Amino acid sequence: MCGIVGYIGKKPALPILVSGLKRLEYRGYDSFGFFALDKNEHFLLKKVGKISEWEKNLLDISFAGNLGIGHTRWATTGAVTQANAHPHFDCHNNIFLVHNGIMENYEQVKNKLIKEGHNFLSETDTEVFCHLIEKYFQGNLEEAVKQALREVRGNYGIAVISKKDPNKIVLAKFGAPLLVGVSKDEYFVASDPSAMVSYTRQIINLDDNEVAVISPDNHFLLKEKPLEQIDWEIQEAEKNDYSHFMLKEIFEEPDVIQEAIRGRMELDKGIARLGGLEQARERLSKIENFILLGCGTARYAAMTGECMFEEYAQLPTKTEIASEFRYRKPVLNKNTAILAVSQSGETADTLEAVKEAKRKGILALGLVNMVGSSISRETDAGVYNRAGVEIGVAATKSFVSQLSILALMTVYLGRQREMSMVTGRRILEEMKKLPDFARKILSQADYIKELAKKYSNYRNFYFLGRKYNYPIALEGALKLKEIAWKVHAEGNAGGEIKHGSLALIDESFPTLCICPTDSVYDKMKNAIGEVKSRKGKILAVVTEGNEEIKNMVEDVIYIPKTLEMLTPILSVIPLHLFSAYLALELGLDIDKPRNLAKSVTVE
Ligand code: AGP
């Protein structure tokens, strides 16, 4: 994990590095650091804390160097200390390096280097890169980097500067994202485009095993690489009038549904048009079973997709935790396909699962938000979310978008099989109404805020749902514990609570029940009854007009009536708002919950 930036050009590097790093803070925010070089003078700074808290002081620093690197950290190896913050350097203060990833064999390499006389100042795996490069350095930095990397196992995106081979930044990547931004006489380096979009829209994506050199007037890559265009606006990465990105992103949920379905429906024929799947159309029509893969929230989207694919496309489908998939020896055959669901497209666990599927020769598809990300490039075909940049560490609008596209995919796959035109059309017609339904839910924001305040004194929550809304119960609980981390939350299937967890319930342990009027409504009512009989307080998400549940529970939030398979797209919206408001009520930073980072690029 972590975010790295770099600059080489004619301007002072430091302010550019600070602004870039601020945009990457969502990738890690426990400590940060910079290194900049001006002829023989250098500037090195490392701090514990968030860069946004130090921004003003940093912008007051005047250092003329127009070559530098920076890093924002999410600790993996070594505690959160100033010594462990990046950049790291070698024994002779010649080689300075920032790293995103994990060196898996670092202890072994480090012990060897110590025996050879190297002196380590930190507990990190990253510092091992510096000493390894130092060992091979004979005046040419890229040669030393290449030799050093031969001894490294693990994944990395690194940017390296040497005082003895100045005027260049050497970059290398394996399994972690790294981009070069290209402008006139200047180059930018970053883990993702948001750090450079205000300076340039032209980028080069580095590939695994590539070592690249950028110098003030040229970029020497191992092979000629095409320039790609960043296709989103910088305003997308701004909070605009919202206090937090998470709130902004929740309020964008109606728009992302709209964007997910735009141009992707042929209503009269009852079919979904998913251009990204066309090249795999033939193979997809023969697929006999599907494995959906993802982590965290993306996995809950996949679980909802599993329900949709099985009920409406009659396609045997199974959701797997991406990090477990490749180690479980799954039974796959040539008629199996996988679909990797990932907002960032960089989640290492999911990416490795895709690579494993490809090694086994099965069709690998992606449902990814970030265009050009590793998963989108690694998969055979796929669909983009078009949900725009998501900055809040908690996934919100990307989840709603994933569910919308999984519903479209259900129609796509179903119509290749037994689904009738009438059913296809009915689903699509109903989907068209969802953006307005979502807006209607968000118009209750003040009421949901009041509810969050009312429930903010509780320290434990249970979330229950069934069938399509079971994954929504898991998502509601994850969201709450993730951003309102002073409270504990658990999600479960409505029918499961009586098999053990009911023991937890009393008046101090409220339950959020997702209970729209659908095929499992009566069964959910049983669960509500079981909780009520144990004096548990209940906040229920129910279909508009439902008076029955309203009379049984403490509080209700209404959602508009829609098809059962589409209810999760609506029922999750109040849960996202509830968790955001409750966390704010507890005085927490909802965009940067403790211990977490947006994009987990380590296994
Ligand atoms: C959810 O709020 C998370 N922060 C997390 O579970 C996330 O969904 C997961 O890490 C997967 O990320 P991805 O979609 O970028 O692959």
Image (cartoon, rainbow, N blue to C red):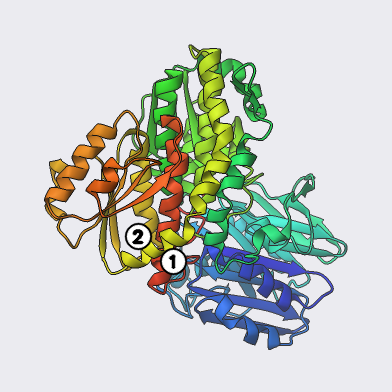
Q: Is residue 16 above or below residue 528?
A: below
Report x, y in % for residue 509.
Answer: 21, 59
Report x, y in % for residue 470.
Answer: 33, 39
Amino acid carrying mark 1 in the image: Pro
Pointer 2 local density, CA inside 10 Å: few below 14, some 14–19, many at least 20: some
Q: Residue 100 sits in which quadrant?
A: bottom right
Q: Residue at x 66, y 44 (%)?
A: 371
Amino acid carrying mark 2 in the image: Lys
Q: Does residue 578 show up?
A: yes
Report x, y in % for residue 481.
Answer: 35, 60
Residue 211 or residue 602, whichever sits in front = 602
Q: Residue at x 41, y 48 (%)?
A: 296
Residue with the mark numbered 2: 481
Residue 444 or residue 92, whichever sits in front = 444
Q: Is residue 482 above or below residue 463?
A: below
Q: Is residue 602 left or right of residue 20?
A: left
Number of callouts in the render? 2
Q: Is residue 166 left or right of residue 264?
A: right
